[in-house]
């Protein structure tokens, strides 16, 4: 008897034995009635279809433990949860094969690691506390449903960042921990032209990583409805589930005032609850077999089927404790103010210059920008690629938000080659302080 059949039987049996049906309220179980009439005994006891044989079946000690309970979807304060909300919110169930396998492992008591990567909403901004953000709330479903499994929760959301930074840091922040499930959220911050390829590369890189995680695409939106609309077509190509909070806003199924904060960007507690409700409703549907007819052994689509070239697939961040092929004037290597997991960068308080040689197919500068203390931070750097000017970066912007991470992509090509990068203060700069958090590189190797 396969464990996924045991899981399905356990869920259906629990529904029969409880008045409210697998949760606190009747609305928590619409998924079970979409494909199965739980009043039909044949749907539960048919030996050929489910592997169950009623009272004559003896489950041996070799069979894994069946969870006696499936946690309800997350409660949402002040919002009527209609069927249409669930229909629009689960934009595409994708192929949940990997997620079902992860649940089977958890049902056996094996450990499970679930990771969330994205921007400030994933980080928990504007939630009243970290344990009220959607990521924390949705991971609780696994803890409650699989109490015998050790559930590891990883939240590596960084405010104001997009999938360019995501693909460069995903190895150190997510993949090294061998996740079983990864939720990817960048639809609010992905607004640059290059983000179509960085997001495409991020999904592919995660799907091809050694632990073969289930990857879910989470689509969020601002009050004005803006979000990265290219994310859904990319996720469709990979057959990954697409959970769309943005669809609820664009279809006016919920009002911004009921879920969003006054900044027009971040959800408040009820918004985080609603995002978690969509995720946990999807988890419940998978566990109860709603999508069994679209589930098959998952295979990552060939690169030729991708929406882009996926040239960022082998990206990383180089830090001052591991990258030494540079020359500086008045820059110091070591610990710096940084939002990255590794705090070893380079900084100057004397308007220094910074140069390095690197072999890579893509190169970027990750630096600090702030709207504070212009007398120190109002410094502009000219960026040169092989002695040719390619752009300017600045440490101060009066119109930006607080102190945060920015990046500038210097170079991108299909194949790695050796290049010389120079950062030199512009003649009209007045500031003195500048911080480089790291160097983004794809296809990096020693020259």
Image: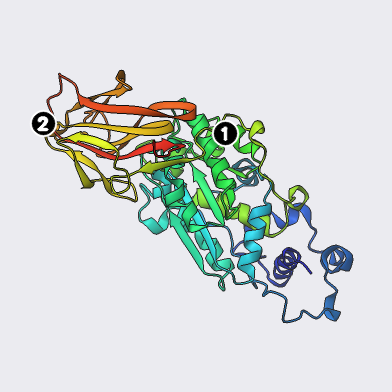
Can see residue 29?
no
Q: Position of residue 261 (x, y in %)?
A: 38, 42
Query: Could you tell which of marks 2 and 1 lies nearer the N-terminus?
Result: 1
Query: Image height check: is 135 above or below 230?
Result: below
For image coordinates 22% across by 44% down, the residue present is 333
Q: How many marks?
A: 2
Give the distance between the C-alpha atoms of the residues marked 2 and 1, in whole angstroms. 47 Å
Q: Nearer the viewer, residue 240 or 211?
A: 211
Q: Residues within 10 Å of mark 2 (few under 14, many from 20)?
A: few
At numbered mark 2, what does the secondary structure look like: helix, strand or loop? helix
User: Disc 2 designates what residue?
Assistant: 375
Q: Nearer the viewer, residue 311 or 36?
A: 311
Query: Image height check: is 418 above or below 63?
Result: above
Q: Residue furthest front?
A: 447
User: Disc 1 designates what residue?
Assistant: 251
Q: Position of residue 134 (x, y in %)?
A: 46, 52
Query: Image height check: is 9 above or below 130?
Result: below
Quarter that holds the N terminus: bottom right
Q: Residues within 10 Å of mark 1 (few under 14, many from 20)?
A: few
Q: Nearer the viewer, residue 230 or 436?
A: 436
Rendered image quadrant of residue 236: top right
Could you say which disc has been placed on residue 259 in the image? none
Rendered image quadrant of residue 41: bottom right
Q: Position of residue 429 (x, y in %)?
A: 15, 23
At numbered mark 1, what does the secondary structure look like: helix, strand or loop? loop
Horizontally, residue 30 falls left or right of residue 216, namely right
Horizontally, residue 101 falls left or right of residue 408, namely right
Q: Nearer the viewer, residue 289 or 75?
A: 289
Quarter that holds the C terminus: top left
Judged by depth in the image, the label closer to the viewer, 2 or 1, is 2
Instruction: Give the color scheme: rainbow, by chain, secondary structure or one colour.
Output: rainbow
């Amino acid at each position: 008897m396969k464990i996924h059949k045991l899981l399905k039987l356990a869920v259906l049996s629990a529904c029969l034995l409880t008045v409210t049906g697998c949760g606190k309220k009747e609305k928590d179980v619409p998924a079970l009635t979409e494909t199965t009439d739980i009043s039909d005994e044949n749907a539960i006891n048919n030996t050929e279809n489910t592997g169950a044989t009623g009272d004559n079946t003896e489950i041996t000690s070799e069979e894994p433990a069946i969870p006696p309970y499936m946690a309800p979807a997350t409660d949402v304060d002040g919002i009527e949860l209609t069927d249409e909300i669930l229909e629009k919110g689960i934009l595409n169930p994708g192929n949940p094969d990997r997620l079902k396998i992860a649940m089977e492992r958890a049902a056996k008591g094996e450990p499970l690691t679930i990771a969330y990567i994205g921007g400030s909403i994933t980080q928990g901004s504007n939630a009243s506390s970290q344990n009220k953000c959607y990521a924390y709330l949705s991971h609780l479903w696994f803890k409650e449903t699989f109490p015998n499994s050790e559930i590891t929760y990883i939240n590596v959301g960084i405010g104001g960042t997009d999938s360019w930074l995501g693909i460069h840091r995903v190895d150190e922040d997510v993949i090294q921990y061998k996740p079983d499930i990864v939720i990817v959220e960048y639809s609010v911050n992905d607004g640059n032209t290059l983000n179509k390829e960085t997001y495409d590369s991020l999904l592919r890189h995660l799907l091809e990583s050694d632990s073969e995680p289930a990857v879910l695409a989470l689509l969020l939106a601002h009050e004005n409805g803006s979000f990265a609309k290219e994310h859904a077509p990319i996720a469709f190509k990979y057959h990954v589930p697409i959970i769309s909070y943005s669809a609820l806003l664009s279809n006016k199924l919920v009002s911004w005032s009921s879920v969003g904060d006054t900044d027009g960007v971040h959800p408040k507690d009820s918004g985080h609850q609603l995002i978690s409700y969509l995720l946990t409703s999807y988890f419940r549907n998978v566990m109860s077999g709603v999508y069994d007819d679209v589930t098959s052994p998952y295979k990552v689509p060939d690169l030729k089927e991708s929406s882009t070239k996926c040239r960022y697939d082998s990206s990383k961040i180089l830090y001052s404790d591991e990258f030494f092929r540079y020359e500086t004037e008045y820059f110091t290597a070591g610990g710096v103010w940084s939002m990255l997991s590794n705090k070893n960068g380079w900084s100057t308080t004397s308007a220094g210059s910074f140069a390095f040689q690197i072999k890579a197919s893509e190169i970027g500068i990750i630096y600090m920008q702030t709207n504070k203390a212009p007398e120190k931070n109002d410094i502009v750097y000219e960026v040169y690629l092989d002695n040719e000017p390619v752009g300017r970066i600045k440490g101060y912007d009066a119109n930006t938000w607080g102190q945060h991470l920015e990046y500038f992509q210097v170079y991108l090509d299909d194949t790695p080659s050796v290049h010389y990068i120079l950062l030199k203060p512009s003649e009209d700069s007045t500031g003195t302080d500048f911080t480089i958090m790291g160097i983004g590189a794809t296809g990096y190797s020693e020259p």
